[in-house]
Image (cartoon, rainbow, N blue to C red):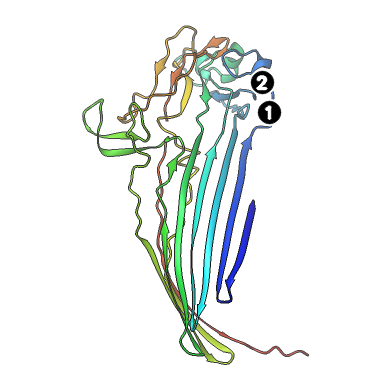
């Protein structure tokens, strides 16, 4: 975090306050073994053998449940804020006028690179078809009978948003006992976007190109299958918040205060279920070996494209990659490309009013 402020006395009745700030927060979620060459030690081909150990999941079995082996997390959420603000104070007669502005840029980047792979073992491959409580995933593991597997591919995302505020306020001393506070603030909060235009939403007015029916997933950005937009809703610029208050000195040691205002809450990135951390529909890719029931994944199967059961969508063209490799634990893998995106949020404007009274009480000492 870094902050810098400068106060300038322009004249005895005119002051200027300038401030700039920078803040960065790192939120890692990393396996203890991320720097260990687990894949190379196990002799597995077709995965990144230089980072971490693969994750082993178990499915089925009788009475004995096995804990998952391995932890693939290697996530880094990086939040960054840039801010500049300026306030001018001008005193003239009964008036103390303040006006100024505040501009912030907020980004939240997900640079996670989980891996190297996940392998799932099932009791079906060592059990008797049609007979319950036969077979065990650990026995399938010893035989190298992989039920399904996947290799994640890094898809970095960075959400970005701006916050702009302008205000003017006048404190008017009407009488020696009564001061009136009047002000107006404007807040501009453009719709959140993504640095690489990796956004999507469901548009009921868009025609599905596969079925010709209304309703399809629309993708931001330029290029094949994308809408040419950076956002899916229009910005609104009418967030005006009036403020009014007063302070009245009832007696020498009693003051009554009352205030009313409309406030627009600042938008916060939705990192858990939206960009950048969560839903990246249409932009993520994973090499997948789908399950074949009682048969293990076998060498030589043709790669298929997953996602035929998803709703109709205009899919962006995936980034080009040089070559694909099968996954292997004695049995190789069949790979499929999976695609996955994100929404935006809005601000709220609660109206607030309050009144207080204050009195001064002399404390007696014993």
The Cα atoms of the two marked residues, 1 and 2, are separated by 8 Å
In the picture of the structure, the residue carrying the numbered disc 2 is 38
Residue 118, x across and y down, in percent:
55, 23
Specify whether residue 80 is in view.
Answer: yes
Q: Can residue 290 be seen in this view?
A: no
Q: Where is residue 99 in the image (x, y as percent from the top left)?
A: 48, 68
User: What secondary structure is found at the residue carrying circle 2?
Assistant: helix
Quadrant position of the C terminus in the picture: bottom right
Q: In the rendered structure, which disc, 1 or 2, sits on the residue that comes first in sequence?
A: 1
Q: Position of residue 310 (x, y in %)?
A: 34, 29
Question: Going by the image, does 51 lie left or right of 233?
Answer: right
Query: Residue furthest toward the bottom?
Result: 251
In percent of width and height, residue 339 lies at 42, 27
* Mark 1, other Cα within 10 Å: few <14 / some 14–19 / many ≥20: some
> Above or below — where is 331 with respect to 343?
above
Residue 36 image-quadrant placement: top right
Q: Which residue is at 42% across, 53% downward?
A: 189
Dot 2 crowding, Cα within 10 Å, few <14, some 14–19, many 20+: some
Residue beneath label 1, please?
Answer: 33
Considering depth in this image, is 156 or 178 the residue closer to the camera? Answer: 178
Farthest residue in the front direction? 11
Q: Would you say the residues marked 1 and 2 are in contact, meaning their CB atoms lie under 8 Å apart?
A: yes
The residue lying at 44 percent from left, 17 percent from top is 293
Above or below 271: residue 50? above
């Amino acid at each position: 975090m870094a902050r810098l402020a400068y106060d300038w006395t322009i004249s005895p009745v005119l002051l200027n306050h300038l401030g700039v700030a920078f803040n960065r927060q790192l939120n890692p979620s990393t396996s203890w073994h991320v720097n260990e060459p687990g894949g190379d030690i196990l002799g597995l081909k077709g995965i990144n053998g230089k980072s971490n150990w693969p994750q082993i999941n178990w499915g089925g079995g009788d009475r004995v449940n096995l804990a998952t082996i391995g932890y693939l997390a290697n996530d880094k959420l990086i939040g960054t804020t840039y801010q500049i603000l300026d306030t001018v104070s001008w005193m003239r007669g009964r008036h103390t006028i303040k006006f100024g502005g505040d501009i912030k840029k907020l980004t939240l980047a997900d640079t996670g690179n989980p891996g190297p792979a996940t392998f799932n073992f099932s009791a079906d491959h060592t059990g008797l078809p049609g007979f319950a409580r036969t077979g065990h995933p650990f026995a399938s593991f010893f035989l190298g009978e992989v039920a399904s597997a996947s290799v994640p591919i890094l898809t970095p995302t960075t959400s970005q948003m701006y916050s702009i505020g302008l205000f003017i306020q006048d404190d008017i001393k009407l009488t020696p006992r009564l001061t009136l506070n009047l002000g107006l603030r404007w807040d501009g909060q453009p719709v959140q976007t993504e640095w690489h235009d990796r956004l999507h939403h469901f548009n009921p007015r868009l025609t599905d190109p596969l079925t010709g029916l209304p309703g399809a997933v629309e993708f931001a950005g330029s290029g094949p299958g994308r809408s040419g937009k950076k956002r899916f809703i229009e910005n609104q610029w009418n967030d005006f918040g009036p403020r009014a208050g007063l302070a009245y000195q009832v007696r020498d040691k009693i003051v009554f205060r009352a205030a009313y205002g409309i406030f627009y809450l600042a938008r916060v990135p939705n990192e858990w279920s939206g960009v950048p951390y969560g839903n990246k529909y249409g932009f993520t890719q994973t090499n997948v070996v789908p399950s074949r029931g009682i048969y293990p994944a076998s060498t030589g199967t043709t790669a298929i494209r997953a996602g035929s059961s998803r709703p109709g969508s205009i899919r962006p063209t995936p980034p080009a990659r040089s070559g694909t490799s099968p996954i292997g634990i004695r049995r190789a893998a069949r790979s499929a490309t999976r695609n996955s995106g994100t929404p935006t949020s809005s601000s709220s404007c609660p109206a607030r009013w309050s009144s207080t009274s204050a009195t001064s009480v002399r404390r007696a000492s014993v």
